[in-house]
Amino acid sequence: MRLVDSHCHVNADRFADDAEDVLAAARAVGVERILVPGWNVASCERARELADRVDWIDIAVGVHPHDAAKIDDAGWRRISGWATVERVRAIGETGLDYDRVFSPIPDQLDNLRRNLRLAAETGKPIILHCRSRAGQRDAQDALLAELTAMGAAHPRIVVHSFSGPTDYASAMLDLGAVISFSGLVFRTGEEASADVARSTPGDRIVVETDSPFLAAPGAPKGRNEPRYVGITATWVAERQGADGEAFGDALVATYDRTFRAVGSPS
């Protein structure tokens, strides 16, 4: 099966000493595309530096909801300046996190809106993180409200590491979103993801590791790597009832259409 990792934080501190080896290991098992998103100024800068050394990865820049209250105007100017660079294929990771609430919700909403405007201005897709507390959906509903309020002006959407009810997925698909599945689908409380994986059109799906987080069964906890993305890809293919070869071809095609439609196809 051909593979992509549409969301992989090899710019995290846990890979500070061997990020290029980790990427090479993924390449060796057939991972053809990897997107490395930032979440604050420092991680966006590390993603850019990594892209300067590894010419086959893609990167994204943005501010995560956890960092929404920490980013200052000078930091945002740096990120918005980087957003126009060709190697930057998306804006994010951004979104809402009402589970851990590391930044106050008003700051998260302001940050989300700023990232959404930047994606719309640059014509690049936006990578959206969204978490509510167990059994709740307030973050999902708030995110949908923000996107709906933008009307036709909303950017292309990538739902990072899907979590939420099936009608949330349906609403995102109605907005044209691509849905990305991670090792989160294997966790208790995320059972709705199986129904979403079955019902999402095959050309609107990508997969990810969210390395070094969200390890799937068989991947190392605490230091997940992109070479394990095939575990989740196989799980999604089974729920789609898809042939592995055809599913892998669709993964690569969807990744390229989503991220490489901006700028050069190289």
Image (cartoon, grey):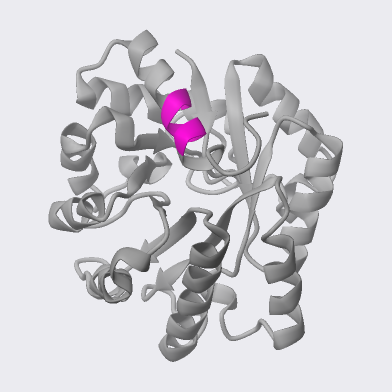
- Magenta-colored span: 252-257
Q: Position of residue 40 (x, y in %)?
A: 67, 68
Does 195 sit above or below residue 148?
above
Residue 225 visible within the image: no
Q: Position of residue 171 (x, y in %)?
A: 19, 57
Task: Name the residue located 41 percent from the left edge and 40 percent from the top edge.
Answer: 183
What secondary structure is the stretch in magenta mostly built from?
A: helix
Does 74 sit above or below residue 50?
below
Q: Position of residue 216 (x, y in %)?
A: 44, 36
Depth check, front residue: 69 or 33: 33
Depth check, front residue: 41 or 190: 41
- Write down the quadrant of residue 39 in the picture: bottom right
Looking at the image, residue 89 sits to the left or right of residue 119; the answer is: right
Depth check, front residue: 42 or 215: 42
Task: Name the residue located 72 percent from the left edge and 32 percent from the top edge.
Answer: 22
Number of numbered discs overlaid on the protein picture? 0
Image quarter (top left, top right, bottom left or bottom right) of the C terminus: top right
Looking at the image, residue 117 sits to the left or right of residue 244; the answer is: right
Image quarter (top left, top right, bottom left or bottom right) of the N terminus: top left
Task: Please tell me whether residue 245 belongs to the stretch shown in magenta.
Answer: no
Task: Name the residue located 58 percent from the left edge and 86 percent from the top edge.
Answer: 69
- Write down the quadrant of residue 185 in the picture: top left
